[in-house]
Every structure is written in structure tokens, then in C-alpha cells.
């Protein structure tokens, strides 16, 4: 039996290695380079359950602007799915819910998975990473385990992960890189009815609960491969003194944020079809907003084109509120030309604005 010499083995290895390098180069030439847009994402779908009901199709501005959550002032939560009603105690400060947070969150998740089946059919799950925002009072790992155990076999997601980030931090991190996963489903479940002695941001609204799912696509920086959704430009924001020490009609913070959005997105005041806010009304928020709309968004009627999430869901916490705002904004804009201004004024010393545009 003949054996190859060391020199012949080296030569054979060089040939194999060169062929492997050439094959890798050829494959790289065929594959498009990953160069994703870092200015915006596309929102291609949204589904949300709120105490006012399930929203899964295009919505009317006047109808949602006039809608208020139905609140049952009962001793506690019932051992039921909670469809259609937000069940709270008589006083937000004395709220003692009847179920622990994880149990109620799992209950809401089960309701959502059963109710969104037709909407879920539009999602390409094999290419979609599910990003979980853990409910308040529930550990990340415990929530990931609960979702994984309840997730339907027919919705084989690319992956399911739990993030410690807030909604605004997640978008900042997502858009900080020009490569990575292209499709996400952002899933937020939260119930403040199960948080004992929770302190709400606005005492005019009782603690509430919600489930919101938003399907997000990242597109190539060239614009190729766009999914036909609505472009979401994330927050421009400013810090300032607390609103309750500002003048009632001081709109400088709102104007600064809006003008920054105009410069960064080419959206104009004339294209704004309405405003979706967190819904908090304390600290001069409402008077300042109405004044701002009268001076900057003259085409929008504050009585019919301001939708506040707190009126639809109650107070559900900052990240859950923002994700629900984005879902509601998409459903209001889905079949219309123009843009929606999303104002995050949850914190008393920060004003942030997002814009969603076709």
C-alpha cells in the first residue's frame, strides 16, 4: 500500500483549503450583504386586548377618542379569562387583587392566544423572533417559562426571548446595529390589578391591564425588501422641569420634540391625522396638548383626534402603555394616508414623541 509523503499531504491540503475558500467567496457573492436601516422599522401588524375590548382591525379616531374602559368595582379578580372588563377594587390605593401577578398574566396570555388566531395567521413565525416584556411583579425567567409552556405548536417561532429592557430602550438597541434578525413580534402582557398597593402615574385612571402584540420588520438601508407596512420613527425626546410647575399653556417642550421629528422624518404638520397619548392628564398635560394642537396641528380636532391609552386600558405601567400606544396608532393609521404622532408624556419631566407614517 502506497502512502503519501508529507509534501504530498501538504499539497493536497492546500488544494482542499483553496477550494473551500473559493466556495465561501462564491456563496458570499450570492448572498446580499446585511445592511439594515437604522433610522426606522416597519410595523406590519398589531393586535391588542384592552378592557374596552379586542382591537385587531382598523379603528375609527372619533370612536376610540370617545371610548372609556368599563370598570367593575368588585372585591377582586374573578377566576375567569377577564374578557371585556377591567375588574378592580373600589380604591386604587387599596387595591388587593385576588390573584398573584404570574397567574393573572398567564390567564391573559391564554386568552390572547385563543383570540388572535386569525391575526396570527398573517405572521411568518419561522422568521420571527418573539420578544417578551415581562409583566410587572413577574421575574423574566418565570415569564419566559410560562410563555414557552403555553405557546401553540402551530406557531413555531424562530425564537422566543425575554428582554430586561423597556420598550424605548429595546427600539434604541435594535436600531443601533445594521445587522441581525429582521422580524420581531413584541409581546407585552401586564396587569396592575395584581400589584398590591401599586402607585399609578395618574390618579384619574384606575390600575388596568392589557395585552399588546406588534409585528415589526427591519428593512434594508436601500429600502429594498420593504414589507409594505408603516414606518415607525422612534423617539425624539427632551427633559424639562416638572409639568406641574410649568405654565398651563406652555407648549415649548412639545414644539421642540415635534420639530425634531419633522427634521428627522420629513413628516409635516399637515400630514398628521391625529395624536395617540399615554392618556395621563395631570401636571398641565391636557391644557398644554390642546394648545399645541391648536397652534401646530390645526387640521386635528382635539375632541376627535386625541386617543389616550389610559382611558382604554387604565394605568398599566410605562412600557406596557407605550407598546399599546404603538399598537393603537397602527390600527388607527392602517388604512389611511398620513402620519400619527405618538406622545409619551408618562414621566413628569420627560416629553418624547414618535411618528408612524405610510
Image (cartoon, helix red, strand yellow):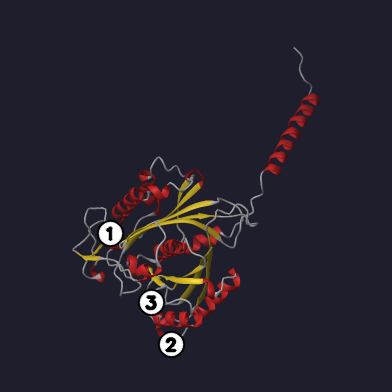
Q: Which residue is mark 3?
A: 303
Query: Mark 1 — residue?
Result: 84
**Earlier-in-chain disc, 3 versus 1:** 1
Q: Position of residue 328 (x, y in %)?
A: 41, 63
Residue placed most toward the observer, 118 or 96: 118
Q: Mark 3 and 1 residues: CB-CB less than 8 Å, in contact?
A: no
Mark 1–mark 2 distance (CA, rounded to whole Å): 39 Å
* As drawn, 278 above or below 103: below
Tally of numbered tags? 3
Judge left or right: residue 48 versus residue 352: left
Vertical arrangement, residue 89 with respect to residue 154, above or below: below
Residue on which the image places disc 2: 247
Callout 3 crowding tier (Cα within 10 Å): few <14, some 14–19, many ≥20: few
Comparing marks 1 and 2, which lies closer to the viewer? 1
Residue 242, visible in the rendered structure: no
Residue at 66 percent of width and 49 percent of height: 33
User: Residue 336: where, in percent of width, then height?
Assistant: 48, 64
Q: In front: mark 3 or mark 2?
A: 3
Q: Secondary structure at mark 3?
A: loop
Disc 2 residue crowd, few under 14, some 14–19, many 20+, Cα 10 Å: few
Could you tell me which secondary element the residue under label 2 belongs to?
A: loop
Q: Is residue 15 left or right of residue 211?
A: right
Q: Nearer the viewer, mark 3 or mark 1?
A: 3
Is disc 3 in contact with disc 2, using a CB cutoff of under 8 Å? Answer: no
Amino acid at each position: 500500500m502506497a502512502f503519501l509523503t508529507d509534501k504530498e499531504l501538504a499539497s493536497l491540503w492546500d488544494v482542499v483549503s483553496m477550494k473551500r475558500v473559493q466556495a465561501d467567496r462564491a456563496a458570499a457573492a450570492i448572498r446580499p450583504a446585511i445592511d439594515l436601516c437604522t433610522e426606522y422599522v416597519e410595523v406590519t401588524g398589531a393586535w391588542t386586548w384592552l378592557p374596552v375590548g379586542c382591537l385587531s382591525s382598523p379603528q375609527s379616531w372619533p370612536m376610540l377618542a370617545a371610548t372609556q374602559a368599563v370598570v367593575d368595582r368588585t372585591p377582586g379578580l374573578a377566576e375567569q379569562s377577564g374578557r371585556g372588563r377591567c375588574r378592580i377594587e373600589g380604591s386604587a390605593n387599596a387595591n388587593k387583587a385576588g390573584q398573584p401577578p404570574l397567574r393573572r398574566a398567564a390567564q391573559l396570555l391564554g386568552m390572547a392566544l385563543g383570540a388572535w388566531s386569525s391575526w396570527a395567521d398573517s405572521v411568518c413565525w419561522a422568521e420571527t423572533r418573539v420578544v417578551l416584556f415581562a409583566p410587572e411583579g413577574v421575574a423574566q425567567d418565570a415569564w419566559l417559562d410560562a410563555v414557552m409552556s403555553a405557546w401553540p405548536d402551530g406557531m413555531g417561532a424562530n425564537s422566543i426571548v425575554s428582554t430586561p429592557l423597556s420598550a424605548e430602550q429595546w427600539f434604541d438597541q435594535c436600531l443601533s446595529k445594521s445587522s441581525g434578525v429582521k422580524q420581531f413580534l413584541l409581546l407585552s402582557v401586564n396587569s396592575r390589578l395584581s400589584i398590591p398597593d401599586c402607585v399609578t402615574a395618574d390618579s384619574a385612571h384606575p390600575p388596568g391591564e392589557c395585552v399588546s402584540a406588534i409585528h415589526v420588520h427591519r428593512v434594508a438601508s436601500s429600502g429594498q425588501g420593504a414589507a409594505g407596512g408603516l414606518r415607525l420613527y422612534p423617539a425624539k425626546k427632551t427633559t424639562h422641569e416638572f409639568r406641574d410647575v410649568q405654565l398651563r399653556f406652555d407648549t415649548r417642550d412639545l414644539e421642540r420634540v415635534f420639530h425634531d421629528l419633522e427634521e428627522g422624518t420629513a413628516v409635516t404638520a399637515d400630514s398628521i391625522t391625529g395624536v395617540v397619548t399615554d392618556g395621563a392628564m395631570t401636571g398641565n398635560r391636557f391644557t398644554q396638548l390642546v394648545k399645541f394642537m391648536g397652534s401646530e396641528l390645526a387640521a386635528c380636532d382635539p375632541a376627535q383626534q386625541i386617543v389616550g391609552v389610559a382611558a382604554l386600558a387604565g394605568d398599566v405601567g410605562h412600557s406596557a402603555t407605550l407598546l399599546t400606544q404603538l399598537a393603537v396608532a397602527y390600527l388607527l393609521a392602517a388604512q389611511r394616508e398620513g402620519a400619527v404622532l405618538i406622545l409619551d408624556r408618562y414621566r413628569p419631566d420627560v416629553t418624547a414623541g414618535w411618528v408612524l407614517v405610510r
